[in-house]
């Protein structure tokens, strides 16, 4: 139990509060300086630039950290980090042909193929990441990040600058991909692959879900599950699939 005069106790509390406030102000100044250094803007919930689809989330971020220019709408292409070559090629070709912004997560495999396909086809693409801007995951995708921004797209995060990637943050970013896009396409995934989170979030939001036809083996086990869960099957070839998604 505290003892002593009320005045002394009040002085002690005020001293502690002022220290906390000063620390918070310094942290905010440091973060603002880092954002300027990175060329990052803050898009808040109330702004027109905030993606309309994200407002459907029960836990929509109050703000997003954005490097580049956020597109509105688009289609999410997601899948395994270690896809079969034919699946990666399909993602590349589909992204190059779609008449919509390509939304994905900058990960290795299907994500990277989708972003690169969009760039190849002159499309806009946006990457939602599971770390803070200033940190690239995977590290060798920094050049891809720069290319996305240079072509009018965006790298987007709800994490503070330089925060490291975590498994929890990657799952959290999956809900943003699903909410931003008007539809989600699963190209290939293992049954426990991270892309399955995006598909589940899309289902919860009532967004259309599509899946590329599956083949035998674990690399497509998630595709079979997605079809069983109500996702619509796309044609095998990219030109026909792009027409379905138009």
Image: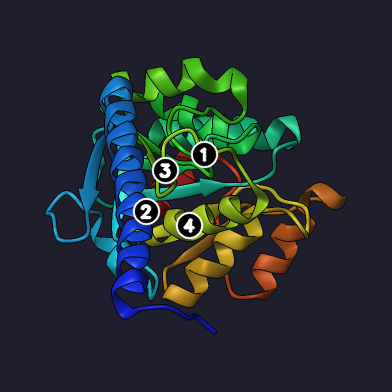
Q: Considering only vertical position in the picture, is 236 above or below 146?
A: below
Q: Where is residue 206 in the image (x, y as percent from the top left)?
A: 42, 76
Instruction: Tell me the residue that label 3 is attached to.
Output: 160
Residues tagged 2 and 4 counted as in contact (Cβ below 8 A): no
Task: Locate residue 65: give its quadrant.
Answer: top left
The residue positioned 48% from the left and 67% from the top of the image is 202
Q: In this view, does 193 lie to the left or right of 218?
A: left
Q: Where is residue 84 in the image (x, y as percent from the top left)?
A: 76, 35
Point out the residue furthest to the bottom here.
1
Q: Considering only vertical position in the picture, is 197 above or below 122?
A: below
Instruction: Tell me the residue that label 1 is attached to.
Output: 163
Count residues near mark 2 (Cα–Cα under 10 Å), then give few for <14, some for 14-19, many for 20+: few
As drawn, the label of residue 79 is none
As drawn, the label of residue 20 is 2
Scheme of image coloration: rainbow
The residue positioned 70% from the left and 33% from the top of the image is 86
Point out the residue furthest to the front here.
4
Mark 1 → mark 3, Cα distance in angstroms: 6 Å
Q: Considering only vertical position in the picture, is 240 above or below 67?
A: below
Mark in front: 2 vs 3: 2
The residue positioned 61% from the left and 47% from the top of the image is 187
Q: Which of marks 1 and 2 is nearer the N terminus?
A: 2
- The answer to which of 138 and 246 lies nearer the viewer is 138
Mark in front: 2 vs 4: 2
- The answer to which of 146 and 244 lies nearer the viewer is 146
Mark 3 → mark 4, Cα distance in angstroms: 26 Å
Mark 2 → mark 3, Cα distance in angstroms: 19 Å
Instruction: Tell me the residue that label 4 is attached to.
Output: 184
Q: Which of marks 2 and 3 is nearer the N terminus?
A: 2
Count residues near mark 3 (Cα–Cα under 10 Å), then give few for <14, some for 14-19, many for 20+: some
């Amino acid at each position: 139990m505290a003892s002593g005069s009320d005045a002394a106790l009040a002085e002690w509390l005020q001293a502690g509060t002022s220290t906390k406030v000063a620390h918070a102000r310094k942290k905010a100044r440091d973060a603002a300086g880092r954002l300027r250094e990175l060329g990052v803007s803050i898009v808040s919930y109330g702004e027109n630039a905030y993606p309309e689809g994200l407002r459907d989330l029960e836990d929509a971020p109050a703000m997003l950290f954005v490097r580049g220019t956020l597109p509105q709408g688009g289609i999410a292409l997601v899948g395994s980090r270690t896809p079969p070559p034919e699946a990666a090629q399909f993602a590349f070709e589909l992204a190059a042909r779609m008449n919509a912004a390509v939304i994905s997560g900058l990960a290795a495999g299907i994500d990277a193929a989708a972003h690169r396909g969009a760039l190849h086809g002159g499309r806009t693409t946006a990457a939602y990441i599971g770390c803070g801007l200033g940190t690239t995951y995977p590290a060798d995708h920094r050049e891809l990040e720069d290319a996305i921004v240079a072509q009018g797209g965006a790298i987007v995060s709800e994490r503070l600058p330089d925060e490291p990637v975590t498994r929890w943050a990657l799952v959290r970013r999956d809900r943003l991909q699903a909410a931003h896009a008007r539809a989600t396409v699963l190209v290939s995934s293992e049954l426990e692959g991270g892309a399955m989170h995006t598909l589940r979030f899309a289902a919860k939001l009532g967004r259309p879900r599509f899946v590329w036809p599956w083949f035998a083996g674990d690399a497509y086990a998630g595709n079979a599950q997605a079809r069983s869960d109500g996702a619509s099957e796309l044609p095998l070839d990219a030109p026909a699939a792009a027409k379905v998604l138009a």
